[in-house]
Amino acid sequence: FGSRGGTTSGGPPRPNPFSAMSVQQISPAAMLQLEHQFDRHLQYSRKRMDKLTGMLPKGQESPFGDFPAEYNRPNGLKLMQAELGRSTAMRISGTAALATPRRSATTGPSFREAAPGQRQLPLDVHIGGGSAESSPQVSPRIQHLNRGTGTGGAAFSRSLRKEHPTTEPPRAGAFHRRPIKPSEFRRFYDRGDLPVQVLHSATQNRISWKVEPEKLDFHHYLPIFFDGLREKEDPYRFLAIEGVHNLLTTGGSKILPVVPQLIIPIKTALNTRDAEVMRTMLKVLQALVLSAEMVGEALVPYYRQILPVFNIFKSSTQSTGDQMDYSQRKRKDLGTLIDETLELFETHGGEDAFINIKYMVPTYESCMV
């Protein structure tokens, strides 16, 4: 075919150096890392504000853990409070120093300042004669209203109507984000109990296992990795997502007995109502159903714990109108992911899957017709 083709006349085909690069795909965890770096340019203080408001868990104060309580680093608010306390103490001590025994003595009467040529009088003596106790006081009963001028005894009140404050009913907040608590994966990783580490390569980060994944105890490690799916910080998020996909790929028959232990981490991640965490969990649920046989049927008794959040966000689809959505390959539309997950549940859940899905998500339509 000449120099432009893949082969030459009379020779073997030449290898394409770009074929290996085109086949290689970016892992879901590495894709989240890239998107996070892009979002930092648009909302650089978003994570900091989430930590200040308690939406994200705070990290450790040092690589070796948190400092003791008596060695905490003071923040700006504590410095201002300490400075205010010192100034108040100095003001009180200065006032006490000015109060000498001669000024604070109360044996003699206090005198008021008099005009030139007049005699000073005590404070409790009036110029007109007599003391303050003997001065006449006007009784409040003297100030009375004339007949017919008050509001008492009338058939109806002529006073102005009191304006009662009107308060709007509180919002339910079904779509609002919930605070994300630290996961068990974070605690185990900080303690060094997980056989994983990040392998930094030229193109993307990868996970490096110190022990082969198929030799691990799935009853112990798989729930821990599922619990780490609600993390939004690296390296916890990256290692949890990559570790879950690797374990589901190599688990085989070890996955089915561990399904009941995965329900609580799945429910906790979905109840955060965080769009990023929910998208990650939905993709993992699809991989879980397709990982081994009978896993879809094993999830049917736990639809009451998993599907309520599906029913809330099922209609959360992105309406672009006549425009083109160029990020479809990232699968970021929450409503579409929920529909795909429910279809997989029905397809691999057996004969009782549809009636249980329909009970928890009434708007779902069967895909098996």
Image (tube, rainbow, N blue to C red):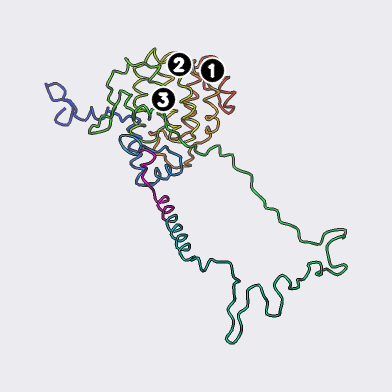
Q: Which residue is mark 2?
A: 295
Crowd tier of the residue under label 1, counting other residues whose Cα lies within 10 Å: few below 14, some 14–19, many 20 or above: few
Q: Which residue is mark 1?
A: 301
Mark 3 element type: helix
- Taking the spot 36% from the left edge, 16% from the top edge, the residue there is 217
Residue 197, image x, y percentages: 28, 27
Crowd tier of the residue under label 2, counting other residues whose Cα lies within 10 Å: few below 14, some 14–19, many 20 or above: many
Mark 1 element type: helix
CB of mark 1 within 8 Å of CB of mark 2?
no
Q: CA distance from mark 1 to mark 2?
A: 11 Å
Whichever of callouts 2 and 3 sits on the residue coming sooner in the sequence is 3
Residue 40, image x, y percentages: 35, 44
Residue 365, image x, y percentages: 56, 25
Indicate left or right for 259 with 30 as reference.
Answer: right
Depth check, front residue: 81 or 217: 81
Q: Is residue 202 above or below residue 93?
A: above
Q: Quadrant of the N terminus?
A: top left
Crowd tier of the residue under label 3, counting other residues whose Cα lies within 10 Å: few below 14, some 14–19, many 20 or above: many
* Outermost residue to the left: 10
CB of mark 1 within 8 Å of CB of mark 3?
no
Q: CA distance from mark 2 to mark 3?
A: 16 Å
Q: CA distance from mark 1 to mark 3?
A: 19 Å
Depth check, front residue: 27 or 147: 147
Image quarter of residue 280: top left
Q: Magenta span has 70?
A: yes
Q: Which residue is mark 3?
A: 226
Q: Is residue 152 above or below residue 323?
A: below
Magenta portion: prevailing SS class: helix
- Magenta region, residue range: 67-83
Kind of residue at disc 2: Val
